[in-house]
Image: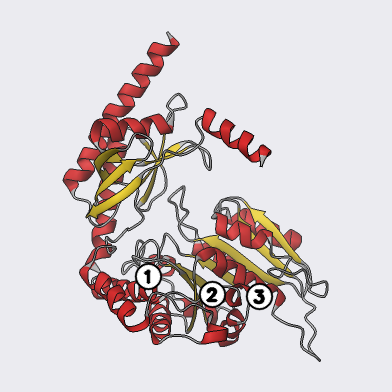
């Protein structure tokens, strides 16, 4: 433990450790928080929640979770393969399948486990079966800026979870430049071999840059490799892009069924922690066989199935989204308004979604910027300084009012001026 102790001390000393806050209650976008060290209590306006449609406090969603606890209790206490499913699981899978236009859906406790299970199932199948030999290698193409859950899964894709199988064919992983269709095509021409099973995997919306994967162009490239699997992680796309919030396919006016007709296999990962007021994840595909394989993957068997209140909250949230498309329209209108106001005041804003990264000038420390915003103006935004180029990560949601967004912009303008002024004074 000595190495860990020394490292964490340095982490704190260099200011890399994030500031900590404890939430005591929420009312819309107003949050009652506590600073654990000082024990100071603040009521702040948040622009850092991923509750993009404001459904976390929706009365119907909360009641659905309560009703599920009354009927099923708080946990299923085992996995589907050993203890079966509850009817809420079946309802949620059907709801997602309809929402994503893919026939088969499998639930997971979180996105990390979903993607690990997918790699186990797709690359290594399951247990050895007499008379069946798996000999085809897998080539995985991954965006360099993919989310950590994708990177973790593909980094371990040569191993079936928990055990290295010597008889499993090789899995080769190649990264392509961020959203660079030409580089993807070059990598395929260079590394694809006859007989390869090819998978392209990408975030649909990138969580730190707020931009969207160029899906139509990707499909044009991948169509040249029949049978290719196209995996879209829609964690930040579901509920936020597309006319009805269905995600990247909806955004580009493409149907997953169109992809199937073109000879490719679409797989979509949906997560519930952003748009669906819950937790957990799901993989949707056109393949009932893949669904069966996911059920018996080590990742599925080694954990519990999605707990009843979590399942019920996600189910009711998706029903709310489908019944109330105006939620998505409000979110998208707020996104356009806030982005335009920040650009109007000469902030360097990147991306195009409700994830709004603002790149700061090099002399401004994001942590100090965020602290100033909270202490002086009671506004909570997320500083990013160690997992991406320094920036402020702002998230718009459907509950924000124009007055609140104007308040944010005014505070950021004044904070920028204060930070630049103090930097200039110190330099002098």
Q: For the residue labelled by badge 1, is the local secondary structure a helix, a strand or a loop?
A: loop
| Residue 316 visible in the current orientation | yes
Give the mark count.
3
Q: For the residue labelled by badge 2, is the local secondary structure a helix, a strand or a loop?
A: strand
207 and 28: which one is in front? 28
Residue 312 is situated, as x and y percent measured from the top left of the image, at 34, 76
| 297 lies left or right of 45 | right
| 298 lies left or right of 423 | right
Which mark, by number, is residue 266? 2
**Would you name the residue on which mark 3 appears?**
122
76 and 375: which one is in front? 76
Q: Earlier in the sequence, mark 1 or mark 3?
A: 3
| 256 lies left or right of 116 | left
Q: Earlier in the sequence, mark 2 or mark 3?
A: 3
Quarter of the figure with the N terminus: top right
> Are there few (<14), some (14-19), or many (20+) residues within 10 Å of tag 2?
many
Which mark, by number, is residue 170? none
Which residue shows up at 34% across the image and 17% down it? Answer: 421
Q: For the residue labelled by badge 3, is the local secondary structure a helix, a strand or a loop?
A: helix
Q: Are marks 1 and 2 in contact (CB under 8 Å)?
A: no
Which residue shows up at 46% across the image and 52% down it? Answer: 207
Which residue shows up at 37% across the image and 31% down it? Answer: 369
Quarter of the figure with the C terminus: top left
């Amino acid at each position: 433990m000595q190495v860990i102790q020394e490292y964490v001390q340095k982490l704190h000393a260099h200011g890399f450790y994030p500031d900590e806050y404890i939430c005591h209650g929420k009312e819309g976008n107003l949050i009652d928080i506590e600073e654990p060290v000082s024990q100071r209590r603040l009521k702040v306006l948040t622009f850092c929640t991923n509750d993009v449609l404001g459904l976390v406090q929706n009365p119907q969603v909360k009641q659905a979770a309560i009703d599920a606890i009354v009927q099923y209790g708080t946990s299923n206490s085992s996995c589907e393969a050993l203890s079966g499913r509850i009817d809420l699981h079946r309802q949620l899978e059907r709801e997602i399948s309809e929402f994503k236009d893919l026939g088969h859906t499998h639930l997971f406790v979180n996105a990390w486990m979903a993607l690990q299970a997918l790699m186990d199932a797709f690359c290594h199948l399951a247990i050895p079966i007499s008379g069946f030999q798996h000999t085809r290698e897998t080539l995985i193409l991954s965006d360099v800026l993919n989310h950590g859950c994708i990177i973790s899964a593909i980094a371990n894709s040569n191993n079936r979870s928990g055990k290295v199988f010597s008889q499993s064919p090789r899995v080769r992983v190649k990264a392509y430049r961020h959203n660079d269709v030409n580089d993807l095509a070059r990598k395929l021409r260079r590394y694809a071999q006859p007989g390869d099973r090819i998978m392209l995997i990408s975030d649909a919306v990138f969580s730190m840059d707020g931009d969207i994967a160029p899906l139509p162009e990707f499909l044009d490239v991948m169509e040249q490799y029949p049978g290719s699997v196209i995996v879209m992680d829609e964690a930040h796309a579901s509920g936020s892009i597309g006319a009805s919030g269905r995600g990247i396919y909806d955004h580009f006016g493409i149907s997953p069924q169109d992809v199937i007709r073109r000879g490719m296999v679409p797989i979509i990962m949906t997560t519930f922690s952003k748009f669906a007021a819950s937790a957990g994840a799901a993989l949707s595909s056109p393949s009932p066989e893949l669904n069966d394989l996911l059920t018996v993957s080590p990742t599925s068997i080694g954990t519990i199935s999605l707990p009843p209140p979590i399942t019920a909250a996600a189910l009711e949230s998706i029903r709310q989204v489908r019944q109330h498309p105006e939620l998505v329209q409000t979110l998208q209108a707020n996104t356009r308004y806030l982005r335009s106001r920040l650009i109007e005041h000469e902030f360097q804003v990147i991306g195009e979604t409700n994830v709004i990264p603002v790149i700061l000038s090099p002399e401004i420390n994001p942590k100090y910027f965020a602290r100033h915003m909270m202490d002086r103006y009671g506004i909570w935004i997320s500083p990013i300084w160690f997992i991406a180029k320094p920036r402020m990560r702002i998230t718009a949601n459907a509950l924000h009012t124009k007055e609140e967004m104007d308040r944010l912009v005014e505070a950021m303008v004044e904070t920028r001026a204060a930070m630049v002024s103090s930097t200039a004074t110190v330099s002098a």
